[in-house]
């Protein structure tokens, strides 16, 4: 057991903290963890190996998954891995390779079948069959299409197989043009377009998940079509978004809360050393407006307690968990009382006034009848009740009374919904104000001191966070996409929040190991926490460990962005303070020795060639004389590739070595026929004189020079013992004796050519 404690600690690896499925998996895990008295740590990464390099806003999301590496046997006793979500953009082999890092920890996989692992997933057959059979039998649909997901994903594969199997069971042949493969996201318009183009007579489409279905909605809208009216659509997962879109999306209800509950039970058993078999969670189809109305059988009046209990579970299933247990119990009694009172009022079993029905409605709404309901499901149930009661009314007057009562019920529900929307708006306004204060407070520091980290933890109450800790790496790790990430052996706890009290940790007590992270904050208490990465672009600064709250599911990524930006600011301020101190010392030394700034040498101390001042002075003079003598000048702008990466990964000494090498090669190339200089940190320039009469082609001269330059670096890299490649990008421009272009203008044009070359460079400098 981790750290020899009596209470188990279970880690939960998920893909995307703000994802709906993640929210419900975590909810199920945590409510079962409270019953089992175990700790829970959520590691919210992202989708493994998803390439977002063409998306500037999301291209650094791969950094989220570095938190997975902190799940180790030193701090967790078993792992729950949401492999179906994490691995939806990688191959099966890619996911297997990712899982190898946890080979010494008992693991339960969610929604993914991989040989050698125990898993819990949904019965993909039952719910899909129910939805398709409704469309076939009740709506007469025969022309189906499907938008699937990567067949490397076991769930996506099973859902396609089920789609084909149900068609076969009903004598409908399957052809490959009926199926297109998406990527599980809303960005599926292209494949949806292909499906609709190749099957213009489709009557129904099944989507591998709700996000894909919402992407299909966009393509249907573009074509002037509407789901449920022109074509039936249903998805899978029954996310909250499915109930909020227009038209509401029919879906296969796969309760992720149940996945969380079962996976936690299984993980605890495995932590105890018990053998655990894989498990399957049943699914069912939920009809909504996105599928056509089919033929319905006239049913009798349903008013028994069992039926009301079942319909209650359908309407309030998202909140039927232990945190809401007491409220849901009261609401269930009120719901049953309402439905029973309505039924008895119009079947002659109860002769009370309509006022009694309205009192029941008010009590039901007061307890949260709209606030917690799937309103679409609630209205559907009331509609079914109205239809069944209408069929047994003896005359027009009784039917009129029934209609009036239901109209009053609907009006009260609408008013309750308006009130709920008002409360949501007020809550959102209060949240926005809290966010504004949070952003302001996050930057209320002027020094790059350790005390500044404490400031970052002082305004987390709006996220309902009472306990947290900031752990910083000894120095930032430069981490590129698809590179491995080695878990740091040591971290430094800069500040802690414990029961709303912030403490800055003294330097002598900051050093921590991975095994210490959770016990530092929570001591012996049972906890539910989340580990969040702190990064800015390619640089990883550390982690934030804090309470896992419902608010984290909504604002977790915002929190990461703000704290990460603040930590970058602290590191910049700290670096600035060191530079300022060094500058003051240097100025004092200069003053002491009466060194005047204008006597500084024209040479660059590091590379031995001219510095910016020296280069422009001598180069301008050369250009002037060349023009007087009827000769032309080639100006070359050179920029080193990947200096920052070499500095960060191999040290500044190696970066300096690279700059010296560039200066040496340029000096050799220009010889006595020109001058070379270092004009910026990693920027160089040189000029060479040419006889206009003897130069056949400027392009030829330019290509010869640049080829020779690049060849020098290729030869060096092949023979050097350095673990990295030194490379440059360069551009050139000619100044003729009569064209009037200045040296600076020529170098600007050369720099533009360099920029085009730079676009093609590779960031991977390792050999």
Image (cartoon, rainbow, N blue to C red):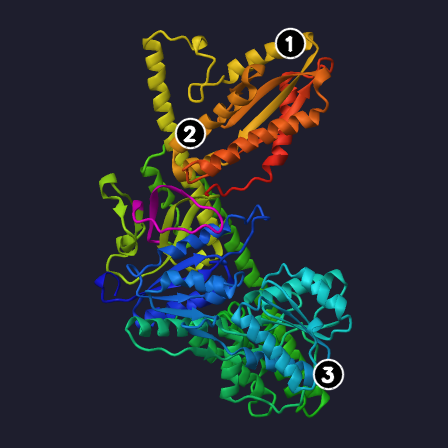
Instruction: Report the Cα–Cα distance between label 3 and label 2.
Output: 75 Å
Asked whether 381 or 253 is in front, the reply is 253
Residues at circles 3 and 1 in contact by the CB criterion of under 8 Å: no
Q: Which mark is residue 140?
A: 3
In the picture, measured across the screen, residue 588 lies left or right of residue 631, that is: left
Among numbered discs 3 and 2, the one appearing first in the sequence: 3
Magenta segment boundaries in residue numbering = 466-495
Q: Residue at x 52, y 14 (%)?
A: 613
Return the residue at label 1: 624
On the image, the x and y values in percent for residue 678 come to: 50, 22
Return the residue at label 2: 657
Q: Nearer the viewer, mark 3 or mark 2?
A: 2
Residues at circles 1 and 2 in contact by the CB criterion of under 8 Å: no
Among numbered discs 3 and 1, the one appearing first in the sequence: 3
Instruction: Report the Cα–Cα distance between label 3 and label 1.
Output: 87 Å
- Residue 195 figure quarter: bottom right
- Circle 2 SS class: helix
């Amino acid at each position: 057991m981790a750290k020899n404690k009596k209470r188990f600690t279970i880690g939960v690896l998920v893909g995307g903290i703000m994802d709906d499925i993640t929210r419900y998996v975590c909810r199920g895990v945590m409510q079962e963890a409270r019953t089992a008295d175990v700790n829970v740590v959520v590691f919210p990464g992202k989708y493994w190996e998803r390439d977002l390099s063409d998306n500037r806003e999301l291209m650094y999301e791969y950094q989220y998954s570095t938190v997975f590496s902190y799940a180790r046997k030193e701090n967790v006793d078993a792992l729950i891995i949401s492999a179906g979500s994490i691995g939806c953009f990688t191959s099966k082999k890619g996911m297997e390779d990712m899982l190898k890092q946890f080979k010494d920890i008992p693991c339960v996989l969610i929604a993914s079948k991989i040989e050698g692992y125990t898993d819990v997933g949904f019965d993909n057959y039952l719910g899909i069959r129910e939805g398709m059979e409704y469309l076939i039998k009740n709506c007469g649909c025969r022309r189906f299409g499907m938008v699937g997901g990567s067949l490397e994903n076991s769930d996506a594969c099973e859902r396609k197989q089920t789609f084909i199997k149900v068609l076969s069971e009903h004598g409908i042949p399957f052809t490959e043009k009926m199926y297109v493969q998406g990527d599980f996201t809303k960005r599926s318009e292209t494949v949806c377009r292909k499906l609709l183009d190749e099957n213009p007579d489709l009557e129904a489409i099944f989507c591998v998940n709700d996000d894909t279905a919402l992407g299909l909605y966009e393509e249907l809208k573009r074509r002037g079509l509407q789901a449920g009216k022109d074509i039936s659509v249903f998805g899978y997962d029954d996310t909250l978004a499915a109930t909020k879109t227009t038209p509401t999306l029919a879906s296969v209800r796969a309760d992720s809360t149940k996945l969380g509950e079962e996976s936690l039970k299984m993980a605890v058993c495995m932590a105890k050393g018990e053998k655990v078999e894989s498990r399957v969670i049943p699914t069912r189809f939920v009809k909504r407006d996105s599928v056509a109305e089919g033929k319905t059988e006239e049913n009798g009046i349903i008013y028994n307690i069992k039926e009301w209990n079942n319909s209650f579970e359908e309407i309030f299933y998202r909140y039927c968990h232990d945190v809401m247990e007491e409220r849901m119990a009261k609401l269930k009694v009120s719901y049953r009382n309402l439905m029973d009172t309505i039924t008895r009022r119009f079947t002659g079993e109860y002769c009370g006034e309509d006022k009694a029905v309205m009192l029941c409605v008010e009590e039901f709404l007061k307890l949260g009848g709209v606030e917690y309901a799937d309103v679409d499901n609630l209205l559907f149930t009331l509609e079914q009740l109205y239809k069944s009661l209408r069929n047994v009314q003896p005359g027009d007057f009784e039917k009129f009374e029934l209609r009036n009562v239901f109209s009053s019920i609907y009006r009260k529900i609408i008013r309750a919904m308006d009130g709920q929307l008002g409360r949501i708006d007020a809550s959102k306004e209060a949240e926005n104000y809290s966010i504004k204060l949070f952003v302001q407070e996050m930057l209320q520091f002027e020094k790059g001191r350790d005390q500044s980290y404490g400031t970052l933890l002082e305004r987390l109450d709006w996220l309902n966070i009472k306990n947290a800790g900031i752990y910083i790496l000894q120095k930032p790790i430069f981490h590129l996409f698809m590179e491995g990430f080695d878990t740091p052996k040591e971290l430094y706890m800069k500040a802690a929040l414990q029961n709303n009290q912030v403490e800055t940790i003294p330097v002598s007590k900051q050093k921590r190991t991975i095994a210490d992270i959770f016990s530092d904050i929570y001591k012996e208490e049972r906890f539910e926490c989340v580990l969040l990465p702190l990064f800015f672009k390619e640089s990883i600064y550390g982690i934030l460990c804090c309470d896992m709250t419902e608010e984290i599911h909504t604002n977790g990524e915002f929190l990461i962005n703000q704290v990460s930006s603040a930590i970058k600011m602290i590191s910049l301020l700290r670096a600035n303070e060191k530079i300022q101190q060094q500058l003051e010392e240097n100025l004092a030394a200069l003053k002491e020795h009466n060194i005047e700034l204008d006597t500084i040498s024209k040479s660059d101390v590091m590379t031995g060639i001219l510095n910016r001042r020296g280069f422009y002075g001598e180069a301008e003079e050369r250009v002037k004389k060349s023009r007087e003598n009827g000769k032309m000048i080639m100006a070359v702008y050179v920029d080193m590739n990947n200096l920052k990466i070499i500095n960060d990964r191999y040290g500044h000494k190696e970066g300096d070595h690279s700059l010296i090498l560039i200066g040496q090669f340029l000096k050799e190339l220009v010889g006595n026929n020109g001058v070379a200089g270092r004009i910026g940190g990693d920027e160089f320039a040189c000029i060479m004189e040419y006889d206009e009469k003897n130069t056949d082609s400027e392009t030829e001269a330019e290509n010869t020079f640049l080829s020779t330059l690049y060849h020098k670096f290729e030869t060096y890299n092949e023979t050097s013992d350095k673990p990295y490649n030194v490379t440059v990008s360069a551009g050139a421009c000619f100044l003729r004796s009569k064209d009037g272009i200045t040296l600076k203008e020529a170098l600007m044009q050369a720099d533009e050519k360099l920029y085009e070359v730079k676009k093609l460079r590779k960031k991977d400098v390792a050999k």
